Amino acid sequence: MSLFGEQPEPATTRPRSRRVTLGWTFLIAAIVAALVMSFLPAPYVIEQPGPVFNTLGTQDQDGNAVELITIEGRQTYPTGGTLDMLTVSAIGNPSQSPSWAQVVSAWFDPTKAVVPMWAIYPKGTTTEQRNQQNAQDMTNSQQEAIAAALNQLDIPFTTELAIGSVATGGPADGVLVPGDIVISANGTPITTVDQLRAVITENGTDKPASLVVRHEDGTEETLEITPQYSDAIQGPAIGVGGADVFEFPFDVDIQLDDVGGPSAGMMFALGIIDKLTPGELNGGQSIAGTGTIDAAGTVGAIGGIRQKMVGARDAGAQYFLAPAANCDEVVGHIPDGLSVFKVSTLDDAMTVLQTIESGGDLSSLPTCDATASALSDGGQ
């Protein structure tokens, strides 16, 4: 009994009270920090399935239904079914990043992907610059798609090599300008980048190379440029980027608003072929696909293929054409109800469509499998 007739306070009561108070303080602080973080910008971009466009169909542009592909000066034929091209919608850019709450939510959504901002917008790249590059890539891919389609159909056309870019401080700086057409180099006719590169390599760096070019005003000029060794290509170079310029025997116009990048090339090529040939190339089925393409018909890798497969499935496609170079991203992520076929060339894509159209054996067609994925991963 105490002096004042009261029971002494247990020795453990006060420390326990302090621990409880500290626990609640830390919990509240964590909740507040989480709330604050959820609204802070994150250095990521969220990719999700975007709109799907049937290259055989139309797009609403200012209230008008505009055909994606129109051909004039050549007989065309009715089409059926769909040849869908896919897009990826991105949330976030250098001036408006997604919040951490959005990033965490997307991380647990299998239809979305979270990628570092720098992977989409390299350091110093603005949203406007990225949009301009995407628009240029789309324009170039459309021209390559037309060329690939006409090559597939053995329809002749002419090709010229234009100067697309000139490296500042390089050998061609102040001599060539974008838009110049290279007619010949050291007396060799030039129509492709590979031809020009071969001549420059043979020329070496100890003497000037002679180039005949046509300027945009139509005048021709003979110029001399001394190549310099380039670490980038491990050989002589004059510091220019090339762009193919095609002259087609009839008009092929591709109109698609608010979509950029080169990944629709293969599907545009297939759409053009379908319109220029009798019957339905796809057998009237719903087919989607993605992949870059060049004039020779080579199909290249693209980004966001998992989101594009989801978009294809949701749009009702039954079959999907995937670039062989993307197979490692395809395996294990194919949506239910979608059959995916691996293609490396326009010929491969045509084989898939012809097999579908004829009711042939689809099991005989190449697909992305675990073996191909493991080989791809092992080579990285």
Image (cartoon, rainbow, N blue to C red):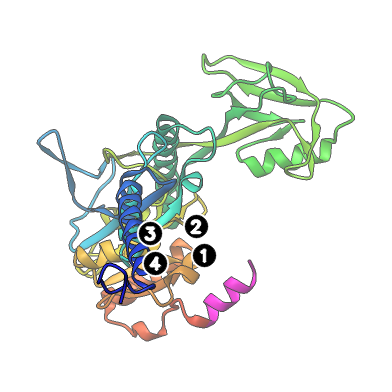
Asked whether residue 373 is drawn in magenta, I would say yes
In the displayed structure, does residue 184 sit left or right of residue 234?
left
User: Looking at the picture, which amino acid does disc 3 mark?
Assistant: Ala
Residue 15: mark in rendering: 4
Label 1 crowd (10 A; few <14 / some 14-19 / many >=20): many
Q: Position of residue 14 (x, y in %)?
A: 35, 66
For residue 75, say whether it is visible.
Answer: yes
Tell me which label, 3 or 4, sits earlier in the chain.
4
The residue beneath circle 2 is 300
Calculate the distance from the C-alpha at mark 3 to the C-alpha at mark 4. 48 Å
Does the residue at mark 2 contact the one at mark 1 (Cβ under 8 Å)? yes
Which label sits in the foreground, 4 or 2? 4
Kind of element beneath mark 2 = strand
Which label sits in the foreground, 3 or 2? 3
In the displayed structure, does residue 266 sit left or right of residue 198?
left
The residue beneath circle 1 is 325
Calculate the distance from the C-alpha at mark 3 to the C-alpha at mark 2. 21 Å
List the single residue furthest toward the right.
206
Tell me which label, 2 or 1, sits earlier in the chain.
2
Kind of element beneath mark 4 = helix
Q: Main secondary structure of the magenta part?
A: helix
